[in-house]
Structure formats: C-alpha cells, structure tokens
Amino acid sequence: MSDLAIKARSGHGHEHLRTSCGRDVTVGRLDLGNARHPSRRIFLDLGGCPGCGGASWAGMTVAEARQVARALLAEAAAAERETGSASQSAGQVDVSHVTGDAYAISVRGHAMLVDQPAGDGGQDAAATPTELLVASLAACVAFYAGRYLLRHGLDRSGLAVTAGFIMAGDRPARVSDVQLRISVPGGLPADRREALLAVASHCTVHNTLRQEPAVSIELD
C-alpha cells in the first residue's frame, strides 16, 4: 500500500466496515494541495482479505465519489429486488442507515441518499429529507404542468420549476412557506396560463399537503 494510503487511513472521521469476505473497507477524506489551493478528495481502501492478492485503493474527486455512491446504492437496491430480500410492494419506501446522519432510501429498486449539512453534524453528502419534501412538490408540479402542455400540443422542452422554502421560526419544526415558479420556455398563450396553474396546483403531492394524510408511526 502506498504511503499516501497509509497516512489517510491513520486519520480521523473515516468509516470502517468489515465485509463478509473478511475485507476491512475504509472510506475517508484526503486533504491535498496547500492552504491557498486546497484539494479535497475521497479515498476508498478495500484493504486485504484472506486468500486475496493484495489490497485495492482509489482516490476520487468529490463528484466521482458521489457517482460511486449512487452506483452502489442503485446496484444494492436492484440486487434486493432481484433476490426478493426486500419486500417492495406498491407504495412502499425503505430507509436504512448508511453512516453518520446519512440514510439510504430505496423504492421499487431505485435508490437515493439523504444527509444533513456539515454545520448540523452531517457530511453534506446529499440533500436533506426536508429538501426532498420540497423537491417532491416541485417535481410533481413540473410533471403535471408538462402533461398539460403535452395534451394541448405545446412544447415542454426546457420546462422548469423553481421552489424556494422557509422554515418556521417556532415549534414544531416544519416548513412554513413554499414558493414555486413555473418557467415555460418560449412563453405560454394568455388563454392557457390560468388553466396550467390550476392543473399544476392540483398535483398529487400538493393535494396531499393540503389534505393531510393519516400518518402512524410504530416501533418494531
């Protein structure tokens, strides 16, 4: 193993995992460059295992590490679906702890990650659950708006929805205000604007927020 790898493994804040085949896997951060031009990289050390021919080690940029994480989550979710080890019935979402404040979300073989900002104790590896809530609303509005445009023979290429949100200043912790703006490149005929807004405002996620669903939380 290179001196760089040995130095990186001796640091703090790294995540360690022993696999079923006996490998000691380590993931952590490398501080390269200098004070004026720092370079943050992520390393993945697969370590050695009994009967294996040496160790494997890789250094990645932050963007590359995110791609690897997404690929691993997607493949794990697909493997669960194929082997039947996870019950993915319609309307079911599974969440499992990954590391620190990061959690993996799996639904119908698709996977994503949530985390918390570094200032709140997380590693900022992904969006927060609250941000995903707002993103879900924005994406649902975009979907309904896009279908409206398609039905009326209008171009939906470049359709975009921007969502800003504000957290409540009192308890309980919640989002108190969401502002959404729909952008239709090329504009929209005046006689279609009100109808599109009516359709978009009645998307499934918005309807759910306006008519609160019954939510029960139990402990296994």
Image (cartoon, rainbow, N blue to C red):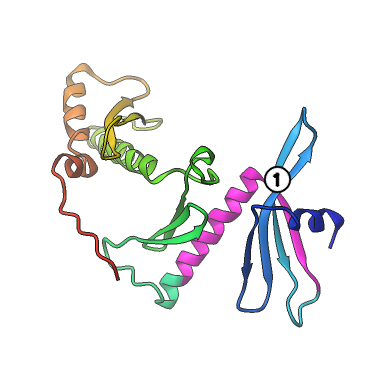
Magenta region includes residue 69: yes
Image spot of residue 77 (x, y percent):
45, 65
Q: In terms of secondary structure, where does tag 1 sit?
A: strand
Residue plotted at (20% across, 59% down): 216
To which quarter of the image does residue 82 belong? bottom left
Start-end of magenta stretch? 54-79
Residue plotted at (73% across, 53% down): 11
Image spot of residue 157 (x, y percent):
39, 32
**Mark 1, residues whose alpha carbon is within 10 Å: few (<14), some, or many (≥20)?**
some
- Quarter of the rendering occupied by the N terminus: bottom right
Residue plotted at (56% across, 55% down): 69
Residue plotted at (64% across, 48% down): 64
Q: Is residue 98 left or right of residue 131?
A: right
Q: Is 209 rendered above or below residue 153?
A: below
Looking at this view, name the residue that lies furthest to the left: 211
Image spot of residue 19 (x, y percent):
62, 73
Looking at this view, name the residue that lies furthest to the right: 3
Q: Main secondary structure of the magenta part?
A: helix
Looking at this view, name the residue that lies furthest to the top: 190
Q: Is residue 15 left or right of residue 33?
A: left
How many numbered marks, from 0 up? 1
Q: Can you identify the residue that label 1 sits on? A: 41
Q: Is 183 rendered above or below residue 116?
A: above
Image spot of residue 90 (x, y percent):
27, 64
Looking at this view, name the residue that lies furthest to the front: 171
